Image (tube, grey):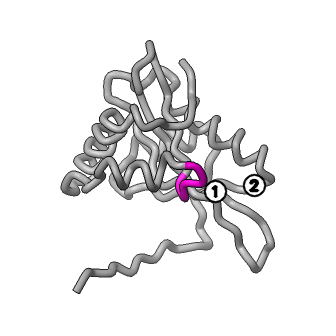
Amino acid sequence: MSIRRAEAGDYAAVRSLAEALAAHIEEPPPPLTLERYLAFYVREHAPVHLFVALLEDRVAGLIAWILTHELYSAQAGVYISDIAVHAEARRKGVGRALMTKAKEWAADHGVTKLGWDVWKHNASAMQFYARLGATVDTEALPHLLLLTNR
C-alpha cells in the first residue's frame, strides 16, 4: 500500500468514494465537478489537503483535511473533513494508514491536534477511531449554520 497526494487523474476514483460516502449518510451525490475537484484538492496551494491510498495501483481510500489555527491558544490544528475506504478494501489497514498519514503530516507541520466529526449512527467508525486512541471531545459541541443561495 502507498499513500500520496491526490492527482488530477484520481478524479473518477475520488468522486466514486465521495458518492459512496454521501450514500452512507443518506445524502444525494455531491456535485463534485472536475473543475471543483482540481480547484479545491489538486492545484498548488489548494485549500484542502487530499491524499489517496493505493492498493495494487488503484485508489482504495482517501483522507481530506484543512489546516486550522486557533487564536486563543496560538496552536495549529488539522480538521479531517473526510475519510473513506472502498468496501472491498476495508479491514486491510487502509483507514489506519490514511490516519497515520494525517498524523505524520500534522507533526511535520507543527500541528498539536487532529479533529473530526462522526455521524452518531456510525458505530463502526467510532470503534475504529477508539482503536486509534481517539477520544470524544466532551467540551466542544459542533454547530452548523446552513446557508442557501437566494
Magenta-highlighted residues: 44-48
Asked which quadrant contains residue 5, the reply is: top right
SS class of the residue under badge 2? loop
Q: Is residue 13 above or below residue 123?
A: above
Of 71 and 114, the residue lying toward us: 71
Of 4 and 42, the residue lying toward us: 42
SS class of the residue under badge 1? strand
Amino acid under disc 1: Val
The residue pinned by badge 2 equals 111
Q: CA distance from mark 1 to mark 2?
A: 7 Å
Amino acid under disc 2: Val
Q: In which quadrant will I find the C terminus?
A: bottom left
The residue pinned by badge 1 equals 78
Query: Dot 2: within a 10 Å radius of its alpha carbon, few (fewer than 14), some, or many (20 or more) residues?
Result: some
In the rendered image, residue 111 lying in the magenta stretch gets the answer no
The x, y position of residue 51, in whole percent, is: 53, 38
The x, y position of residue 47, in whole percent, is: 55, 58
- Mark 1 / mark 2, whichever is N-terminal: 1
Q: Are marks 1 and 2 in contact (CB under 8 Å)?
A: yes
Image mark count: 2
- Would you say 124 lies left or right of 128 here? left
| Magenta: main secondary structure | loop
The x, y position of residue 106, in whole percent, is: 71, 48
Residue beneath the point at 33% across and 53% down: 121
